Amino acid sequence: MIPKFIEHIGIAVENLEESIAYYENVLGLSCYAIEEVKDQKVKTAFFKVGQTKIELLEATSDDSPIAKYIAKKGPGVHHLAFAVDHLEEQLKTIENKGVDLIDKTPRKGAEGLDIAFLHPKSTNGVLTELCENKQQ
Ligand code: ZN
């Protein structure tokens, strides 16, 4: 598998509004989308830096994976997402290489992308997301 580019960097935040203000006022980026992903219990905010996005993630419930992450590790970089083609096939290939998959088949993420996560136990501690944009 060869990732095409870094699709986004996911950052766990405690307060979406305050975090958006930092990216806009300090870094001069502009938030172009805010979206709630109900099945992941998160609210997301997106910024573009060239081709790569920054995805801020705020928990919408105490049992959200983001709430659990922040409770354990504090706010900060949460995951790295690579853009790939043929996600479903890629997952099979990766699983055959002995990698633990959180998602054995793709599911819908923010922005209508098909996504799947690889377990950080198998990726040197970096929660890794693969994304395919079938809308292009
Ligand atoms: Zn993501």
Image (cartoon, rainbow, N blue to C red):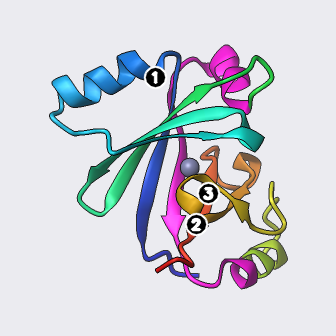
- In percent of the image, x 80 and y 23: which residue is there? 63
The CA distance from mark 3 to mark 1 is 21 Å
| Mark 2 CB within 8 Å of ligand 1 | yes
Looking at this view, is 60 or 69 the one in front?
60
- How far is mark 2 from mark 3, CA to CA? 6 Å
Q: Which mark is residue 32?
A: none
Q: Is residue 85 above or below residue 25?
A: below
Which amino acid type is shown beneath numbered disc 3? Glu
* Residue annotated with mark 3: 129
Pointer 3 residue Cβ closer than 8 Å to ligand 1: yes
| Residue 16, label in figure | 1
Decide if residue 99 is on the left or right side of residue 2.
right
Relative depth, front residue between 106 and 69? 106
Query: Callout 2: 10 Å neighbours few (<14), some, many (20+)?
Result: many
Give x and y (percent) for residue 105. Answer: 82, 69
Task: Tell me if mark 1 has few (under 14), some (14-19) or many (20+) residues whose alpha carbon lies within 10 angstroms of its own.
Answer: some
In the rendered structure, which segment of residues is drawn in magenta?
A: 65-90
Q: Residue 117: x and y, percent?
A: 70, 56
The answer to whether 82 appears left or right of 24 in the picture is right
Element at label 3: strand
- Name above or below for residue 24 compared with residue 29: above
Q: Is residue 74 part of the magenta span, yes or no?
A: yes
- Where does label 2 land, which residue? 131
